[in-house]
Amino acid sequence: MSAEPNYGQPQQKSIVQPILIGAVVALFGGLIYQFVQYDKLSTKIAQVEKSYQEDVEALKIASSQSAQASRRNQETLQAQLETAQRQAAMAVGQAKEQAMARAEALSKQIIVEANKQKAIVAAEFDKVKAETEAVKTEATAKIGEVKTDVVAVKEDVKSTKSELDKTITSLKAVQGDMGVQSGLIATNGTELQALKALGEKNYFEFNLGKTKAPQRIGDVLMQLKKADNKRNKYTVDIIADDKKVEKKDKGVSEPVQFYTSKARQPYEIVVMEVKKDLIVGYLATPKVMAPRK
């Protein structure tokens, strides 16, 4: 068999060469691009490193300046503090000295005032002592006088009691105008005091003149209608329990009796003296009030 002619080899070789050339060109172009980009990146990194270094240097300078300022402020404050402490110490010392001086002055003043008060108290004590002695002397004299007066009073009481006993003995028991035994009556002021001393009845003295309206004597009303001092006779109206009773032409020392709803025993009027348009006497009422049934 004979070999066939290779008509396709030259054609393939013509196609491959351009492709290889293009690939080489492309590769070379890529390398150039990468180199350019690398150069740009290197420049950028250099710029960043330079900026970083500048910032670090600026920060170092600022930090150093701040530290120096802070140190200066601290030193200034420390100096001010020391000055203030020295001034405070001096002020405390001066205040202490002033306080001690003031205390010493007050102490001296207190001693002076205390001595004055002692002198005043001593003088007052002497005065009171003298007055006490005078009072004692006067009291002793007064006691002597009182003893004398007591003895005299005792004698007077004894004499008065004796007179009172005589007066009571001289009192008379008479019968009233209503026929009721009156008991003892008084004809004058002395005998009336004796009756009061006995205390058997309640006594109300009166000076009853002629008036337009009744006058209250004790718990009754009385109105003088007539007084005849020549005959020692009088006429009165007596109002008790809203009832009026006329006692006409009654005489001196005559018990004038009337009843009230307040007591079983009669009330009594005794006139001791008849003057012109005036009677003097007393109203006697029972000591114990027991309503009449």
Image (cartoon, grey):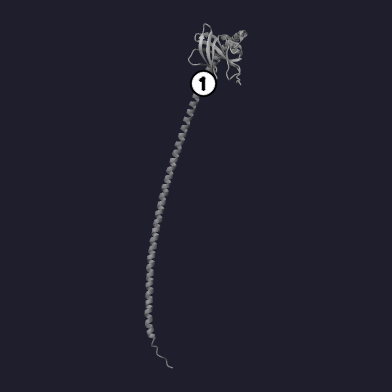
Inspect this view and state whether residue 130 appears: no
Q: Residue furthest bottom?
A: 1
Q: Amino acid at mark 1?
A: Gln
Residue for badge 1:
117
Q: In the picture, residue 86 is in which quadrant?
A: top left
Q: Is residue 35 above or below residue 251?
A: below
Whether residue 83 sits left or right of residue 285 in the image: it is left
Residue in the image at 37% along x and 70% along y = 33
| Quarter of the figure with the N terminus | bottom left
| Quarter of the figure with the C terminus | top right
Q: Which residue is nearer to you in this view: 155 or 9?
A: 155
Residue in the image at 44% along x and 38% along y = 84
Q: Which residue is nearer to you in this view: 102 or 126?
A: 126
Whether residue 80 sits left or right of residue 148 in the image: it is left
- Around disc 1, counting alpha carbons within 10 Å, would you say few (fewer than 14), some (14 to 19), or many (20 or more)? few
Q: Residue furthest top?
A: 230
Element on which disc 1 rests: helix
- Image position, residue 257 (x, y; %): 58, 14
- Image position, residue 32 (x, y; %): 37, 70
Q: Is residue 20 above or below residue 33?
A: below
Count of numbered tags: 1
